[in-house]
Amino acid sequence: MPPTDNLRHLHDRLRSGVALASKLEDLLRERGNPAAKLAAFARVSDYLQDVVLPHLRAERAALYPEAARLAGIDPRLVSRLTDNCEELERQVARVLHDHARFRGGVHDNASSRRHITTLVRLLRRHMQAVEDELLPCFDLELSDQDVYGIYERIQEAGFEEEVAGRVPAGAEAAVAAARWLSDSQGIDAELFFLGEYVSDPELIERTVATTIEACRLLGSSGLPAHLSIDPTALGLLSDADACRRHAERIARSVAGQPVGRLNLMMLDMEDLTLVEPTLRLHRELLALGLPAGITLQARLRRTAEDLVPLLGLPTVVRLVKGAFPLGPEHDHQGGRAVTAAYLALATRMLAPEAREAGLRPVFATHDGTLLLRIGALARSAGWAPDQFEFEMLLGVRVDLQRRLRSEGFAVRAHLPFISAGQTSALPGSGGHPAEALHLGES
């Protein structure tokens, strides 16, 4: 038996994920039965978060560096496999976001099925490339002991990634995670209590109280009180006035923390019907002198106009690629068009006039090529590294986060957390980071 068979067997868990995803794909072709679809979505989300993502990151950490040093392996193969992993991470984020929308009552079966189909195809293609192209080279060039050492490193790295990818349970655990990120990586955190599209007053109050608790714990720990909130988690859909009062309570708590840090309440942007109410809420909070930021989605055609009044304000604008596609009337169509729109908006956010007005741009995406291009653009435009920042989800593209930080850029991890009584596994907890940043095209 070739020693690399141990490495091939590691893909058995990925093949199980393909089988789960394929069953969900079949379910989404059927009409009705939303309960069965939601249960299947939850199983797929759990598997993606607990098995597939950790394995892909472990491969990048332990397998490809070994391959890159071997003279008999074409560097283009290593580059292609790395690109495959990055594309798979982005596709997983899309599926996780679809799950969040399904849980919120948005049953876009066709779009979800398309994302699952693409994920299955990418996973199969990736496994075939590793098993048929890379591992035979290992058989030729490495000893059995060396191959087994790689196998052990992948298993160890996969375990560490799985643990790191779990959402903290409770505000204290979330703040401890933020402290670890700051001390060990030099990366700031933005805390987000999972939940959206809420109308129950008790759940809304729990969200407000828990977010305020996290805010106070951050301040007392010497960390920036930087928090993110979905307006629908504050009842925007049911009572806009009550939502504003809840948001003001959180923002005043943020404002009351020690000065000298970037204390901020960032408003997330949700579907198109909520753009105007969210922009209005942002204006109302700024009028009260409260530290509130706003998220804009590059996917939406209207964002080019929505950005105009913000460029002259001393506020924070977070740009995401966005999700919630509606069609060509409202959206830029296709990944290339969305990326082009993102870059055009980023260029405007980095204009000298925006810097002079006190705007702080935040670029939230996992598209490494795009982020590096924006970083070069910011430097050439005279922006200091601490005048803007890059933001990514906790545990996603960790290699890119560390690279950007090592190059002097400000990096923030979007760190979701749940109630102390809930399970800490991401999807099974009732939410996941993808729903927080709406990274449908990340």
Image (cartoon, grey):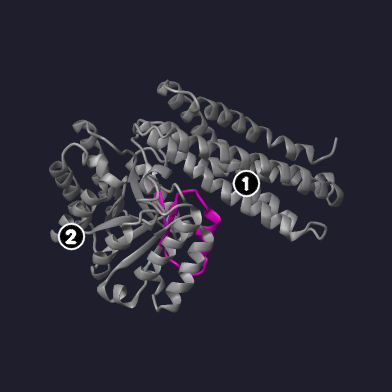
Q: CA distance from mark 2 to mark 1?
A: 44 Å
248 lies left or right of 134: left
Q: Which mark is residue 286?
A: 2
Residue 381, image x, y percentages: 41, 78
Q: Visible in this render: residue 262? A: no
The residue lying toward the viewer, choosing from 65 and 310, is 310
Q: Visible in this render: residue 422? A: yes
**Which of label 2 and label 1 is nearer to you?**
2
Q: Which residues fall within the magenta stretch?
A: 390-415
- For image coordinates 64% across by 53% down, the residue present is 82
**Residue type (three-letter) at the residue carrying disc 2:** Leu
The residue lying toward the viewer, choosing from 326 and 124, is 326
Residue 41, image x, y percentages: 47, 30
Q: Which structural element holds mark 1?
A: helix
181 lies left or right of 68: left
| Residue at the spot of label 1 | 58
Residue farthest along the front direction in this orientation: 329
Marks 2/1 in contact by CB < 8 Å: the verdict is no
Callout 2 crowding tier (Cα within 10 Å): few <14, some 14–19, many ≥20: some
- For image coordinates 19% across by 56% down, the residue present is 256
- For image coordinates 31% across by 74% down, the residue present is 355
Query: Residue 411 in magenta?
Result: yes
